[in-house]
Image (cartoon, helix red, strand yellow):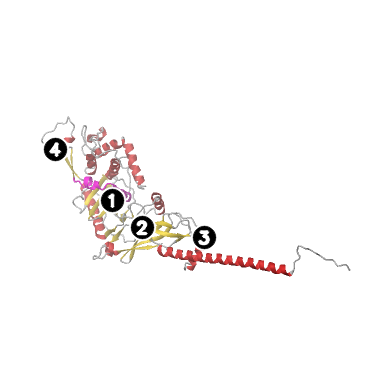
Amino acid sequence: MEVFTYSDETNSFDSGDKNKLSFKQYLKNYISLYVSSIIIALLALLFIIFTINNAYIIKNGSLQIYENEPGANEESFNLLVKQLYPEETKINHPLPYSVAHPDLDISAESAVLVDYTTGNILYEKNSETKIPPASMTKLVEMYVVLDEVEKGKFTLDDIVPLPEESWAQNLPKDASIMFLNQGQKVTLRELLLGLSIASGNDASIAVAKYIAGSMEAFVEKMNAVCKSLGLENTHFVESSGYSEENITTAKEFAQFCTEYIRCFPFTLKEFHSQKILEYPKKENLADWHKTSETEHPILQYNTNKLLGVLEGCDGLKTGFIYESGYNISLTAKRDERRFISVTMKGPGNNSKEGNYYRIKDGTNLMEYAFSNFVDYKKNNFTRLKLPVLASSNKNISVRAAYNESFSVPKILLNEKKNLSEMVEVKIVAPKFIFGKINEGEKVGNVLYIVNGKVLNTVPLLSQNDCAPASMIIQKLYRLSLWCLGFNHI
């Protein structure tokens, strides 16, 4: 039998070599284990530090209220909020709590009552019915004029040329006038007095032509103002209100009046609360006009008959054409509270009857407001800083979505305490945000509580976009938060 043998010198070794290789392997394994232990220890230490840091951030970094400092993206953020909360961000908006509809004796077919300070709507009756505003239109004309003056394009002391179509004798017989005539010298300020007191259609024509060059161009400006204020159901074809094709609603016109007073508060004293217009005075007459000692200016009394009748009343404007009935935009202020009402299509067979119902409706609305509501006013938005974990940002800016002022029912108040003492402000928000968040995303609420009743709840929104960290970092954060008791992350 043949025996085959295999010899490989390279694979042959003696017992000494075997022991030597085992030691090398042992040393290698030992070093590997040592390094691994160090790495694990460092990772454990890092994790502990990481967890302690997270605990510190959660404990000390949440709900940091800071001063009202608008961010760089404030304008775009406001546009986003309007898309998210279209009703709440309107100039006038519903009360943030439910209240029984008051049983008021209002004869006008359409009416609305609003709190000027808070923008809350306190009463409505067919407020979205489309009705011609009649001479209330002149308020929009005054807004356009005063806006142009504010921009420096004109001054109230400008002498305004009077086009032939503005002369009183050239207007319809039933038109209200301030008695403009050929050759007269009249300032823009005097024409605005003619608009606000006597409701002069002649003044309206003269003003429109002076400011814009034509009635058509001026009306474009009026409609542009309404569009900028979001008044979708308000449209004008001429500036005086004589046309029944001018259209609005009580609700939208109250919004306009609110903005008008905010922009031009001085007009209440200088124009709308003035009771008498004396025109033309001697200095207004044409150079060729001969006067006698017995000739005096024509006296006209303000068409708003609540001036001097309703306590605190200082505006705004009446209107009447047959298609509109007896309209009035009314405002009154007592102490620091101001309310606005608009009544339209009021009844009456003549101006005496029409004014009777204007006074009755206006008084009922205003007395209801002053007797039942006070204002909680907050000038600035609530702003917070919230920490963000597992994200590209360390924190985010958080802001209340919209105006936090609101009307408070007097029935909830304690006469012995100030309103500010009775209003409890509660911020409901998480201790931190985890990972991704988008601008405009809701993160909590601000609650306003009076006498145990939540009257106002305003969302808190993120003003920043935050991208999430990598998946590994997120898992590390989750493990860390789990150790801290946040099992829901």
What secondary structure is found at the residue carrying circle 2? loop
Instruction: Report how far apart the C-alphas of labels 1 and 2 lie in the structure.
Output: 39 Å
Secondary structure found at label 3 = helix
Residue at 44% from the left image edge and 58% from the top image edge: 394
Residue furthest to the front in view is 16
Please state which amino acid type lies under the numbered disc 3.
Ile
Q: CA distance from mark 4 to mark 1?
A: 36 Å
Judged by depth in the image, the label closer to the viewer, 1 or 2, is 2
Tell me which numbered mark, 2 or 3, is placed earlier along the sequence: 2
Q: CA distance from mark 3 to mark 1?
A: 60 Å
Residues 42 and 352: in front is 42
Mark 2 sits on what residue? 66
- Mark 3 or mark 1, which has the lower sequence index? 1
In 3D space, how far apart are the residues under numbered discs 2 and 3 (Cα atoms)?
A: 30 Å
- What residue is shown with label 1? 342
Which one is in front in this view, the residue at disc 3 or the one at disc 4? 3
The mark found on residue 473 in the picture is: 3
Q: What residue is pinned by disc 4?
A: 296
Residue shown at 29% from the left, 39% from the top: 152
